Amino acid sequence: MHYPAAVLWSLPWIIPPAVTFVRLRNSRSLDDESDIAPDNPPLVSVIVPARNEAHNIARCVKSILSTTYPNLELIVVDDSSTDGTAQIARDAAERDPRARFIASPPLPDGWFGKQCA
């Protein structure tokens, strides 16, 4: 059997979407309430490096803390923000014990913002 060149050229464009479709169809949602959490679930740490993110940080913090996962910690690392990012993040957490806030030290020579945090 001899395939035309057009069919062979189209395979790379057809196969990945087909594989993705099959995987998504067979996957389960992380929000599926039928799953029962283990008795002692592992700690999941979410680290958010933030520098001058006043316009986004409250929504980010609230979104992370809205999870129902039972053993979560949120660590916001403020990288010398000048726009109140750290205080906005603290306010968004509203004394949630799962949230911690760290101020990073000054940047070393040659380093740039969030990568250091």
Image (spheres, rainbow, N blue to C red):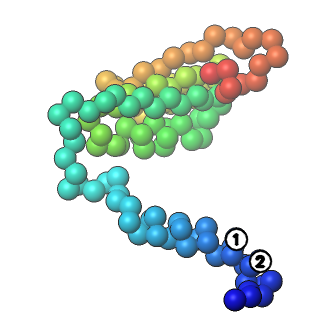
**Which amino acid, mark 2?**
Trp
**From the viewer's perspective, is residue 58 above or below residue 79?**
below
Q: Which of 74/56 is in front?
A: 74
Quadrant containing the C terminus in the rendered view? top right
Numbered mark located on residue 50 in the image: none
CA gap, disc 2 to disc 1? 7 Å
**From the viewer's perspective, is residue 41 above or below residue 105?**
below
Give left or right: position of 44 versus 107: left
Inspect this view and state whether residue 91 appears.
no
**From the viewer's perspective, is residue 57 above or below residue 110?**
below
Quarter-wise, where is residue 109 in the image?
Answer: top right
Q: Position of residue 64 (x, y in %)?
A: 42, 40
Inspect this view and state whether residue 35 appears.
yes
Q: Where is mark 2, residue-wise?
A: 9
Circle 2 Cα neighbour tier, 10 Å, few/some/many (<14 / 14–19 / ≥20): few
Q: Where is mark 1, residue-wise?
A: 12
Circle 1 Cα neighbour tier, 10 Å, few/some/many (<14 / 14–19 / ≥20): few
Quarter-wise, where is residue 55 in the image?
Answer: top right
Q: Position of residue 27 (x, y in %)?
A: 38, 61
Tags 2 and 1 touching, CB below 8 Å: yes
Give left or right: position of 17 versus 63: right
Residue at position x 55%, y 22% in the image = 77
Q: Which of 17/113 is in front?
A: 17
User: Element at badge 2?
Assistant: helix
Residue at position x 38%, y 28% in the image = 73
**Which amino acid, mark 1?**
Pro
Quarter-wise, where is residue 100 in the image?
Answer: top left
